[in-house]
Image (cartoon, grey):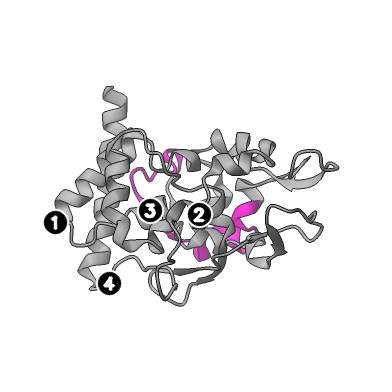
Amino acid sequence: MTRLKDIGTAVAVILVSLSVMTLGSGSHLSQAQNSAQPKEPLEKVFPHSNKCKRCHERVFEEWEASPLSRSIHSPAFRASLEAYLAFSGRKDPGMCLRCHAPHVNVYEDQAPAFIEQVRSGDPAIDGVACSQCHLIEQVDRTKQLPKIKYALGKTLFGPYKDFVPNKAHESKDLDLFRKSNLCLNCHFAVPAAADLGKSNDLLGPWESSQATKSGKECQTCHMPEQVGESANGENKRKVANHTFPGRKGDRDCAEPGSP
């Protein structure tokens, strides 16, 4: 319990620090560029990951073991959210959720319901799951902070040119899913690693990292290629790993000038 409390406190400090910078500058985390909230209920526009599991069992099992699947389920996030809400006076209640449950960008008026789901300790909604990523059509990084644009409908985007047509949804190859911009709508700073001499700190923009200078994208390390099925029963081919392994201490993602 002490360890969980310490983790929650550390994350809360980072989130509150970010909110100070964001709110203090007169801007806040940007909403997705959807002009109006859909008339359909949230669960229809952003299907729950359990529905995707029916056809994508391998991907689901990898994602389920990843930190992304716990983006709103962890005690650390609950503690951080409570700290932010107390600090901000609820002026922008959806701020933390815009990354931890990005479909709130489309259903902004439901932010209080999202928060109550998190507070329950066992949310029935997803945080960062299948539809929250694969409906992203564009990330506008000219904005501060970046804006995501969802293409809400039956088409799911991904990095595969050789996708297999199916009756569940349309598929479309999108270069964005091979680029760091997909991730940088939220992960716009590189976290420090303890053995680099900077703990509890942010090293700064991704563009200044050694990974960028060496031509690597986020997916190179955090969604490495493997051989397997994208959907159940498909021929095995090169696919992306969805466990999102960390690279803490990897100097390729470290501060500029590190050896």
Does residue 82 sit above or below 88 in this rendering? above
Single out the mark in the foreground, 1 or 4.
1
**Pointer 3 residue:** 202
Whichever of labels 2 and 1 marks the residue nearer the N terminus, that label is 2
Q: CA distance from mark 2 to mark 3?
A: 37 Å
Q: Quadrant of residue 246?
A: top right
Q: Is residue 207 at all visible to an observer of this figure?
A: yes
Residue at horizontal 48%, vertical 55%?
Answer: 255
Does residue 53 sit above or below 95 in this rendering? above
Whichever of labels 2 and 4 marks the residue nearer the N terminus, that label is 4
Q: Are marks 3 and 1 in contact (CB under 8 Å)?
A: no
Q: Which label was assigned to residue 89?
A: 1
Q: Secondary structure at mark 2?
A: helix
Q: Quadrant of residue 60?
A: top right
Q: Does the segment drawn in magenta span residue 221? A: no
Q: Are marks 2 and 4 in contact (CB under 8 Å)?
A: no
Q: What's the amino acid at mark 4? A: Ser
* Structural crowding at the residue carrying mark 1, measured as other residues with C-alpha within 10 Å and reported as few (<14), some (14–19) or many (≥20): few
Total label count?
4
Q: Which label was assigned to residue 44?
A: 2
Q: Secondary structure at mark 1?
A: loop
